[in-house]
Image: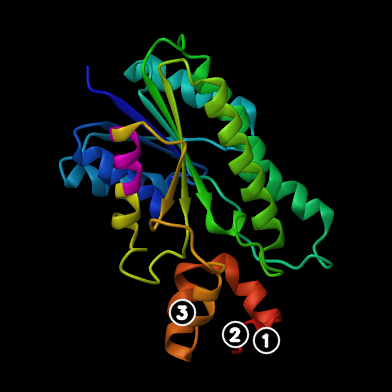
Amino acid sequence: MTETVVILGAGSGFGFAIAQAFGQQGKHVVLAARHEDALQRMTTQLRAADISADWLVADATNSQSTADLFRQVVQHFGIPETFVYNVANTTLDQPRETLTERIDQAFDSNVLGAIRSTRQFLDLADTTVPRNILITGGGAALHPVQATTTLSLTKAALRSYCYSLADSLVDTAVYVGLITVQGISGTSEAMQPENVAQAYIQAVTDRNQTETLYPAGEQKTSEFTALRAATRDPASLQAFLKEHPAAKSFLETHPEFLQE
């Protein structure tokens, strides 16, 4: 039977590229996210490229929804070999201004959703069955700045959880890999989604380290230094906002962020 990869948080950027990369390896990919139309469109694109793909609607912040996701995957495709948690609330904010309710929401998406869904994935089979858990981290965990207050603290918490989970499974057949993406999609050749996706393939090929820093080596400054570079002139700003709509509100209300 073809091995199945479930990607929760399958958006048009990294999520789609990860699905494409695994599909090109001969895996059957299942795309999962909240928006049915986008899932259908991406699945159609993958199938047009001769990749075995299906989609299921799922909400990472709802434990019943993710439980239903895994139930349907097992029912139709068997126990999945790999689970990728690629969900993230990347809204920019400030340490003294953000409502705690918004921080709660981000923590639910970025951390609790990963904890709930990885537990559900683990419960599908005994830990003697070789499987992979891949979680998308971020450079904001390593270099917090005021504009990424909530993103940084939630990615740091997620990073801590990954290390703890990996330690608990070290003597089993289950591999846990954290892919710490140190950059912003599309802002360089290395950060093209199809290139980032190869880090996920390499991680499950090697299965020998808990954290993969991508690009290799810890960056010296916040990845959001790249944000200023990517939005330096009006044309690049518009292109960036189109690709990263979650940043639009912050950039409109904090124009000083774009200044040198």
- Circle 2 sits in a helix, a strand or a loop, which is it? helix
Residue neighbourhood size for the residue with mark 2, other residues' Cα within 10 Å, grouped as few (<14), some (14–19), many (≥20):
some
Residue to which mark 3 is pinned: 230
Q: Is residue 253 magenta?
A: no
Q: CA distance from mark 3 to mark 1?
A: 15 Å
Q: Is residue 203 magenta?
A: yes
Side of 236 relative to 143 (left or right): left
Residue 253 point in image, percent of width and height: 71, 80
* 36 or 129, nearer to the observer: 129
Residue to which mark 1 is pinned: 256
Residue to which mark 2 is pinned: 258
Q: Is residue 25 visible?
A: yes
What amino acid does circle 1 point to?
Answer: Glu
View extreme (left): residue: 50
Q: Earlier in the sequence, mark 3 or mark 1?
A: 3
Q: Residue at x 47, y 16 (%)?
A: 171
- The N terminus - image quarter: top left
Q: CA distance from mark 1 to mark 2?
A: 5 Å
